[in-house]
């Protein structure tokens, strides 16, 4: 869904998990940028005094997002609010999708009246066996998001339906988060959904891939298992989260002085 530009946004609050925090669009200092920062920079270039907060914390489930972020976000009275959550829930071995939807609706009901425009998303998924295993849950969640948007006047950005965002080349080595080019495309998708003129076609497919050799693939799989999969399983078994004890990325709605342009396209 896209709207015509009739309003200049002067404040923006982003709510969610690692996707909104910006993992894995890593900067030289080790911090993460991500689509929300890129979008904020572009909005700030059009609105002197623009303010931005990003309450997202990696690893958060939808209940935590609702309980820990939505009330604070609503109290900020921002023009624009984005809410993306629930995917961490549905990717767990056991998940009550109906409960996930109920908690998401609680957050939406709190946020929608507090802002001029609420934006929801159908999150992207990396092509492969993991996504296929959890596709029914994801589609149930995304169908509910569409219904929520209709009832609360929110926009929905359909990233799940964009084939290019399933391309493994737009994902980081952990296979869970988008890389810099993936985040650049998401920022453009939201920018266009808000009614702004396109600066490029974020759905444009990448060039045909060159399949790596067997040894390269096995080495990559082994590194992924050692550096990402085993720690992830360990956290699940011990009930820990990568976001435990971590504060919001940008807790205050404050003037934003980030870069005005996203990174260049993937070469």
Image (cartoon, rainbow, N blue to C red):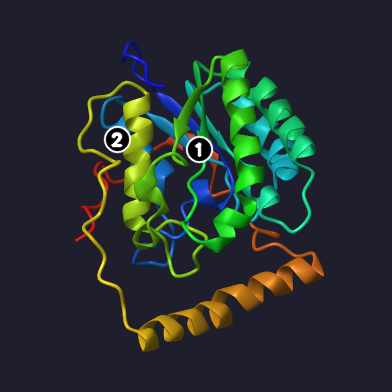
Element at label 1: strand
Residue at x 47%, y 20% (from the top left corner): 79
Q: Residue furthest bottom?
A: 215
Q: Earlier in the sequence, mark 1 or mark 2?
A: 2
Q: Are marks 1 and 2 in contact (CB under 8 Å)?
A: no
Q: Residue at x 23, y 30 (%)?
A: 198
Residue at the disc numbered 2: 42
Left or right of 14 in this view: 57: right
- Callout 2: helix, strand or loop? helix
> In which quadrant will I find the C terminus?
bottom left
Tag shown at residue 152: none
Hey, which quadrant is residue 6 in on the image? Answer: top left
Gap between marks 1 and 2 measured at Cα: 15 Å
Q: Is residue 189 above or below residue 184?
A: above
Residue displayed at 60% across by 74% down: 229
From the top left corner, tell me how far across and down residue 231 is, in percent.
65, 75
Looking at the image, residue 243 lies above or below residue 34: below
- Which quadrant of the figure contains the N terminus? top left
The residue that mark 1 highlights is 53
Q: Is residue 247 visible?
A: no
Q: Residue at x 25, y 54 (%)?
A: 206
Q: Is residue 3 above or below residue 174?
A: above
How dense is the environment of label 2, judged by Cα within 10 Å: few (below 14), some, or many (20 and up)?
some
Q: Is residue 131 left or right of residue 24?
A: right
Report the front residue among 45 and 147: 147
Q: Is residue 214 above or below residue 150?
A: below
Answer whether residue 227 is visible to the viewer in this image: yes
Spot occupied by residue 170 in the image (x, y as percentages of width and height): 36, 57
The answer to which image quadrant residue 179 occupies is bottom left
Depth check, mark 1 against mark 2: the one in front is: 2
Q: Position of residue 209 (x, y in %)?
A: 26, 65
């Amino acid at each position: 869904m896209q709207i015509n530009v009739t309003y200049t946004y002067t404040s923006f609050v982003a709510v969610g998990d690692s996707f909104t925090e910006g993992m894995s669009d890593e900067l030289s200092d080790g911090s993460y940028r991500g689509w929300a920062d890129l979008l904020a920079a572009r909005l700030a270039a059009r609105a002197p005094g623009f303010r931005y907060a990003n309450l997202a914390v990696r690893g958060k489930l939808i209940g935590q997002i609702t309980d820990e972020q939505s009330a604070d976000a609503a109290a900020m009275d921002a023009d624009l609010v984005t809410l993306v959550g629930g995917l961490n829930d549905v990717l767990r071995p056991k998940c009550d999708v109906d409960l996930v939807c109920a908690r998401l609706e609680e957050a939406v009901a709190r946020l929608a009246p507090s802002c001029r425009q609420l934006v929801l998303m159908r999150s992207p998924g990396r092509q492969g066996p993991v996504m296929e295993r959890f596709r029914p849950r994801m589609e149930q969640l995304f169908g509910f998001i569409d219904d929520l948007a209709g009832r609360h006047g929110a926009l929905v950005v359909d990233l799940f339906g964009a084939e290019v965002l399933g391309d493994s080349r737009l994902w980081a080595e952990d296979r869970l988060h988008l890389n810099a080019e993936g985040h650049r495309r998401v920022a453009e998708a939201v920018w266009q959904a808000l009614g702004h003129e396109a600066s490029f076609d974020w759905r444009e497919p990448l060039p045909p891939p060159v399949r790596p050799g067997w040894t390269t693939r096995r080495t990559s799989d082994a590194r992924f298992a050692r550096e990402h999969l085993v720690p992830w399983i360990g956290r699940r078994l011990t009930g820990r989260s990568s976001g435990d004890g971590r504060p919001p990325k940008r807790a205050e709605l404050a003037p934003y002085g980030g870069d005005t342009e996203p990174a260049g396209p993937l070469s």
